[in-house]
Amino acid sequence: MKLGLGIKARIYGGFGVLVLFGLALALFAAWQLTAVKGAVEKMSALSDNNTRALEIGREFEIMRLLACEITHDNVHAMRRR
């Protein structure tokens, strides 16, 4: 099947195909970046929740240690009387 295109038409056609290929590649990359953005936002939210849970756990541990220390001091004070 011979189309009978001249050299000028072939050059423009080839360049057009390259431009379309580049445009398709750019669109695909933009689509993938939006997917990555969503995943990063989700992981950031999970990280924030994890950080908050660790801070609360640390505060509970401090309160528990202070309660044990107060109880320990009260027991020793009662024994000294």
Image: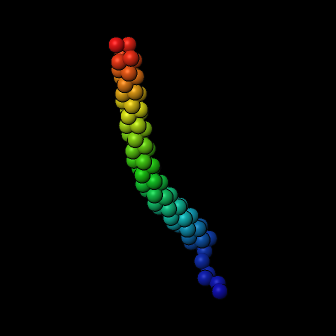
The residue located at (41%, 37%) in the rendering is 57
Residue 73 appears in view: no
Which of 61 and 38 lies nearest the eye of the viewer?
61
- Is 54 placed above or below 79 here? below
Name, please, the residue furthest toward the bottom: 1
Name, please, the residue furthest toward the top: 80
Q: Quadrant of the N terminus?
A: bottom right
Q: Quadrant of residue 56?
A: top left
Q: Quadrant of residue 60?
A: top left
| Count of all numbered marks drawn on residues in the image | 0
x and y, in percent, of residue 24 in the image: 50, 64
Which of 73 and 48 lies nearest the eye of the viewer?
73
x and y, in percent, of residue 22 in the image: 53, 61
Left or right of residue 61, residue 25 in this image: right
x and y, in percent, of residue 45 in the image: 39, 47
The residue located at (43%, 43%) in the rendering is 50
Colouring style: rainbow
Q: Quadrant of residue 2?
A: bottom right
Q: Quadrant of the C terminus?
A: top left
The residue located at (60%, 74%) in the rendering is 6
x and y, in percent, of residue 43 in the image: 45, 49
- Is 10 placed above or below 35 here? below
Which of 43 and 20 lies nearest the eye of the viewer?
43
- Is 81 placed above or below 44 here? above
The residue located at (42%, 52%) in the rendering is 42
Left or right of residue 56, residue 16 in this image: right
Name, please, the residue furthest toward the right: 1
Residue 27 appears in view: yes
